[in-house]
Image: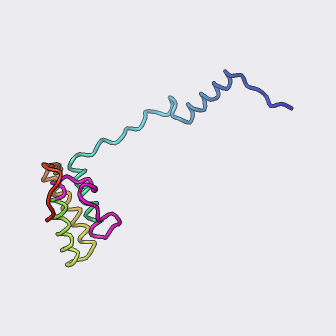
Amino acid sequence: MRAPRFSRAAGASLLAAAVLAGCGGPAAGPAPRSPSPASPVQLCTTLISYWAEQDLTGGKWAGLDWEQKGLSNEQYALYGDIVQAARDEQRRHGTDAALALIRRQSAQRCRAANGATGSSENWRPPT
């Protein structure tokens, strides 16, 4: 016994109906909006707080240099200050207090520096 055969038109109609039903046809409503890009201040805060937390907790990638971390020269300077302050805080009040300090200072310092995106050179000497 042979299986029933569909005409090409019937197959195409069936495929189109399946696509519309499963992939957001007219009844699905508007497409979701993509998130707006982060501001320079948000990016600075995210980068510095992430890498400072990695350094403080001995994360796997903590030893990367500033370029590998995606930091500008200005962000790297902020990062160094914040990591040092966090290490001091960790010795005095523990890791949780140091992580809170990192998040707080990253947000404050990046906001004050308007994202700290300045890079006047590609290399700076170690301190």
Front position in the image: 103 or 30:
103
Q: Which colour scheme is used?
A: rainbow
Q: Where the C terminus falls, by quadrant?
A: bottom left
Check residue 60 for magenta coloring. yes
- Classify 9 as above or below 116: above
Horizontal and vertical percent position of residue 32: 41, 38
Figure label count: 0
Horizontal and vertical percent position of residue 19: 57, 32
Q: Going 24% across and 62% down the picture, which residue do you hit?
A: 103
Magenta span: chief secondary structure: loop
Q: Going 65% across and 28% down the picture, which residue do you hit?
A: 14
Image quarter for residue 17? top right
On screen, residue 42 versus residue 4, left or right, reads left
Farthest residue, direction right: 1
Horizontal and vertical percent position of residue 93: 22, 77
Check residue 62 for magenta coloring. yes
Q: What stretch is highlighted in magenta?
A: 54-76
Q: Going 18% across and 55% down the picture, which residue do you hit?
A: 75
Front position in the image: 119 or 47:
119
Farthest residue, direction bottom: 92
Front position in the image: 122 or 77:
122
Horizontal and vertical percent position of residue 1: 87, 32
Q: Going 22% across and 64% down the picture, which residue do you hit?
A: 102
